[in-house]
């Protein structure tokens, strides 16, 4: 199997530019070309057409962060460059839009969440990769389009033999390898999370399922062990509740939930994922009371009426209620219900030296909370720790009488790599690190952790209301969910529909909050107390005005996906 081109040289001439790969037999001798300039590239992601013509999207720098099977290096994308070609004049009124498009693409691709490998296709689970690798001619030949983030960028080159090996299959998520130790024995521990790209975006802009059954925040996470000649992988899944529901940002801390009660999205979702994973244990961590109850009830109703529910197992665990007052020991009630499925599903194991597959994973745990972030992160790491202990015992690395927590060095490595993974998935979807991350990282809840949760919650509130529209635009442009049209009016004309009054109101709210905090310390006098009450009243009035006009004030996406808009219009 051929690897993708490495050590690429970009050569610019008076008439064109040339890409020259260095690690494989040269397709073209560029030694006689009269160069204007040349530069080294790490990889090529693809091409995109905007208003002025075409642009080549290339990786200028990357950093190795993980290894698979000790020979396949996975690289984190550092710097991406967008190079124009086949350009045409752009009318003055479109030049600002073109700059905006380029800025959106550059910002998302340079955010440190994208990965590629020259010799391994990270869009595919390791179990499927090792089963099909011998049949491939080149890396990326059979990428999984559920997780191929540069699929739109390479669409014009798919299937063309001359293009094979030039474009590295690229994922978004988290990848890292750490050395783990159990006394005098060491092994590589890798976490690889691949974020789906069928229904993707930011927290309040992308919830639930679409009419095809694709769900938001759909992530496969593999925990990989490499010890001596053993390669072992255990995979879990997270994904938004597969119902037609939305929760649009509107200034409120918890926007209202809109649910369309119908079973087609549920059916289509599980009809799609069951063939991939064979058997699924659903772990639903949302509240069974309050605003989340309507989703919890409908989720269970759809499960019970699903024709193939014999291949599903449904476990409802009200995380917040069971673990209130930081009583996280109550999670043992959940693990008691999940462990039979963990044993039934097993894990993938291969002898590296012989290539013999010793066992396969025949099912998966599909966890969700309302965001598929915080509660999900905690529980996925706990399930992974249970399986890790079983695996290390089978390898004679750790005694059967011990747990991972009994090995201080191993436990530290495990907790930190899982906490880093949780923070990354949370950053992509919500804009901050994970809440409850102190438990994942240390095994207990702390006062500092609670304070960090408060900061993250406040930051999320700000980002989700006033910044996420721009992030959603970046995603929609990169994945081709928005079509750039030169003969259409600017999509940015209606950006931030709020008028001057609403803009002043929005910033006045934060000023009034600051004044409340500042005057609180001076409330010991009658004059100080009066000022505090005035500022509190002003804050409340502004808040209610903001809420009433919330959808006009928040940062809404400009580059909308027609399919998504259709879904919302039918729901609401």
Image (spheres, grey):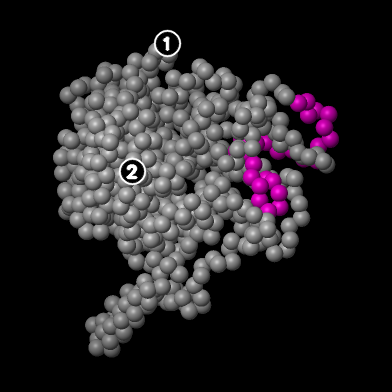
Position of residue 448 in the picture relative to residue 188 (left or right): left
Magenta residues span: 28-55
Tell me the element at label 2: helix
| Nearest the eye: 184 or 57 | 57
Q: Which mark is residue 93?
A: none
The percent coordinates of residue 410 (x first, y second) are 30, 31
Q: Residues within 10 Å of mark 1 (few under 14, many from 20)?
A: few
Position of residue 249 in the picture relative to residue 42 (left or right): left
Q: Is residue 538 visible?
A: yes
Q: Is residue 40 above or below residue 81?
A: above
Q: Which mark is residue 266?
A: 2
Which quadrant does the N terminus fall into?
A: top right
The percent coordinates of residue 303 (x first, y second) are 25, 41
Residue at horizontal 73 percent and vertical 63 percent from the top: 92
Tell me the element at label 1: loop
Residue at horizontal 39 percent and vertical 13 percent from the top: 356
Point out the tag, 2 or 1, that comes first from the N-terminus. Answer: 2
**Total marks drawn?**
2
Residue at horizontal 76 percent and vertical 52 percent from the top: 88
Residue 10 included in the magenta stretch of the image: no
């Amino acid at each position: 199997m051929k690897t993708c081109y490495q050590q690429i040289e970009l050569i610019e001439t008076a008439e064109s530019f040339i890409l020259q790969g260095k690690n494989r037999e040269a397709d073209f001798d560029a030694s006689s070309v009269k160069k204007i300039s040349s530069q080294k590239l790490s990889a090529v992601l693809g091409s995109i057409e905007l208003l002025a013509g075409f642009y080549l999207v290339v990786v200028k720098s990357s950093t190795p962060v993980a290894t698979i099977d000790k020979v396949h290096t996975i690289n984190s994308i550092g710097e991406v460059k967008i190079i124009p070609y086949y350009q045409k004049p752009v009318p003055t009124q479109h030049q600002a839009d073109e700059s905006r498009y380029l800025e959106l693409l550059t910002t998302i691709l340079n955010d440190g969440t994208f990965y590629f490998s020259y010799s391994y296709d990270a869009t595919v689970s390791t179990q499927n990769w090792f089963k099909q690798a011998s049949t491939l001619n080149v890396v990326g030949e059979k990428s999984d389009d559920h997780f191929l983030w540069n699929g739109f960028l390479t669409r014009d080159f798919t299937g063309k033999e001359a293009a094979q090996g030039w474009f590295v299959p690229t994922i978004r998520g988290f990848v890292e390898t750490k050395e783990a130790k159990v006394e005098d024995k060491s092994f590589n521990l890798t976490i690889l999370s691949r974020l789906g790209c069928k229904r993707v975006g930011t927290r309040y802009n992308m919830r639930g399922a679409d009419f095809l059954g694709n769900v938001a925040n759909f992530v496969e996470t593999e925990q990989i062990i490499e010890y001596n000649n053993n390669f072992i992988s255990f995979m879990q899944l997270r994904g938004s509740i597969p119902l037609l529901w939305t929760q649009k940002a509107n200034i409120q801390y918890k926007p209202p939930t809109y649910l369309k009660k119908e079973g087609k999205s549920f059916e289509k979702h599980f009809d799609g994922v069951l063939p991939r994973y064979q058997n699924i244990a659903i772990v639903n961590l949302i509240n069974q009371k309050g605003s989340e109850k309507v989703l919890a009830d409908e989720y269970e109703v759809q499960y019970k009426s699903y024709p193939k529910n014999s291949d599903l197992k449904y476990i409802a665990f009200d995380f917040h209620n069971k673990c209130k007052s930081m009583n996280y020991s109550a999670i043992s009630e959940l693990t008691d219900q999940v462990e039979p499925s963990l044993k039934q599903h097993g894990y993938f194991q291969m002898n590296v030296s012989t290539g013999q597959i010793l066992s396969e994973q025949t099912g998966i745990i599909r966890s969700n909370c309302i965001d598929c972030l915080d509660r999900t992160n905690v529980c996925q790491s706990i399930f992974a720790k249970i399986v890790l202990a079983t695996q290390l015992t089978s390898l004679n690395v750790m005694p059967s009488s011990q747990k991972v927590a009994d090995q201080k060095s191993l436990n530290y490595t495990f907790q930190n790599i899982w906490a880093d993974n949780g923070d990354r998935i949370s950053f992509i979807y919500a804009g901050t690190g994970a809440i409850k991350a102190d438990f994942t990282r240390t095994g207990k809840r702390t006062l500092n952790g609670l304070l960090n949760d408060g900061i993250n919650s406040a930051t999320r509130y700000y980002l989700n209301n006033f910044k996420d529209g721009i992030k959603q635009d970046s995603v929609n442009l990169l994945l081709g969910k928005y079509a750039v049209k030169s003969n259409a009016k600017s999509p940015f004309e209606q950006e931030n529909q709020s008028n001057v009054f609403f803009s002043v109101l929005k910033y006045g709210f934060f000023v009034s909050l600051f004044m409340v905090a500042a005057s609180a310390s001076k409330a010991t006098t009658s004059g100080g107390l009066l000022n505090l009450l005035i500022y509190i009243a002003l804050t409340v009035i502004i808040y209610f005005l903001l809420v009433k006009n919330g959808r006009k004030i928040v940062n809404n996406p400009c580059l909308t996906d027609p399919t998504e808009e259709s879904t919302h219009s039918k729901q609401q």
